[in-house]
Image: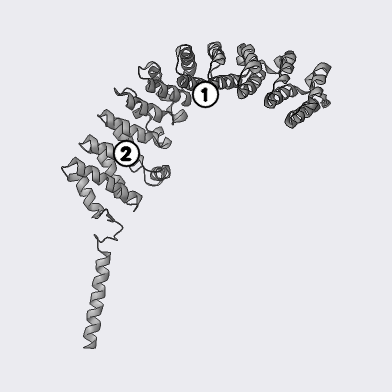
Amino acid sequence: MVRTLVSVTASLLLLALTADLAPGRADDPSDPEIDGKKVSAWVETVTKDESARKRALAVEALSKAWTEKRNDQGLFYIGRALRLDTSAAVRTQAALVLGGLREAEVLYLIEKKENLAVKDLVDALGKEKESRVRKEIAKTIGRFPRVAKMAVPELTAALKDPEPATRVAAAEALSTTGTDGKSAAAGLAPLLTDDDRAVKRAAVIALGRITPEGSATIAETMAKMLATEKDPDMRVELVTSIGLLGERSPEVVTALAALLAAPEDDLRRRAVRTLGGFGPAAAGAADALYKIAATDKAKDVRVDAVRGFGSAVGPAGVKARVRDLLALLADPDYEVRMAVVEEIGALGNELIADQETIKALRVRLSDPHLKVRDAVKAAINKIEKKPEPKKEP
């Protein structure tokens, strides 16, 4: 009797263990339960159900299979739905779900999972016929720069989409690609004259960030746009992209110098900083820079203008116009006075014989602000420091 009980108990235990390991159990990692149904059931729905609404719900559930259970089937069938489902609503849902992934997850998929779902995004963008779906795919791709770099040809093609929102999404995605997207310039440049302002703005931003070939022509086109553009935000983006393109032609310098009289502080500041970054190529704007260094209402703009003036005229120009700079020491804001002193001090021993400048600087040793006094001391030390004797070869 005891042997029989032991045998029955052992059999029941074996059956329990076998049941626990069998496919279809709730704790089976290959087929976990999501929202009350197994992943395999959701896969059946997304691939075979006639209801687009149910298939869209299945896409959402399969996204949880990945985010909550790290089940690859979820992403595989979401990517499949994005490429193959007959309903635009389902394909849109698939794009939205993939757009909700974290960047770290996408990088993991690229590096460890052989582009699982990522390749589906790129392929789907190239083949999608519905504009609204293309828009969501492009927006999703734009969230992940690594993916956008893989999709440059497809995004470039989407720039010709009839819907402005889709063109915007494609241009914004391309703006994240850096130099990898330079081939898109030919598709982006025509959008500078697009009838839709959002499209035009997205093209301006993207062109400034992909370092395109033919950047001189693009920069000069943007410079011409500055002359007629009335929207302050668009003008700011134009100036920013011109600066990023780094083209320093006289036409560009003239267009930026004209903005120094703009009523918007941010626009003047950006124009000043862009010109300051041009160095001697901005010499044609030196007088305009000096004027706002002396008169602009915004302290930050005056500070940047002092720096920009020094950059535009170069060391020889600063030395030649040191009296003009000394006049700016009457500015009420210490930051401006400090910038002036530092620009003069940067000449160092070049001013050793200019006693008038040294005397004017010494007067500022009694400046009311400590930082200016410290800057003056440093400048005088640089000027009066004896040059190192030349070593004989």
Label 2 crowd bin: few (<14), some (14–19), many (20+), radius 10 Å: some
Q: Are marks 2 and 1 in contact (CB under 8 Å)?
A: no
Coloring basis for residues: one colour
Residue 198 vertical position relative to residue 21 in the rendered view, above or below: above
Q: Secondary structure at mark 2?
A: helix
Placement of the N terminus among the 4 image quadrants: bottom left
State the residue in front, 343 or 326.
326
Name which residue lies at 34% across and 43% down.
116
Q: Is residue 211 visible?
A: no
x%, y% of residue 86?
20, 36
Rounded to the nearest angstrom, the CA distance separating label 2 from label 1 is 32 Å
Res 253 → quadrant: top right
Which residue occupies the foreground of this view, 252 or 226? 226
Work out whether 65 lies above or below 318: below
Q: Residue at x 25, y 68 (%)?
A: 18
Locate residue 46, reporting x and y percent. 22, 45
Work out whether mark 2 precedes mark 1 in sequence or the reverse, and give the earlier one. 2
Q: Quadrant of the C terminus?
A: top right
The part of the image, by quadrant, that contains residue 50 is: top left
| Extreme residue in the bottom direction | 1
Q: Which mark is residue 327?
A: none
Residue bearing the label numbered 2: 96
Identity of the residue drawn at 56% across and 19% down: 268
Q: Is residue 1 above or below residue 365?
A: below
Q: What residue type is disc 1 on?
A: Leu
- In this orientation, which residue lies closer to the viewer: 185 or 256? 256
Residue where numbered disc 1 is placed: 244
Label 1, secondary structure: give it: helix
122 displayed left or right of 342: left
Q: Residues within 10 Å of mark 1 (few under 14, many from 20)?
A: some
As drawn, the residue found furthest toward the left would be 50
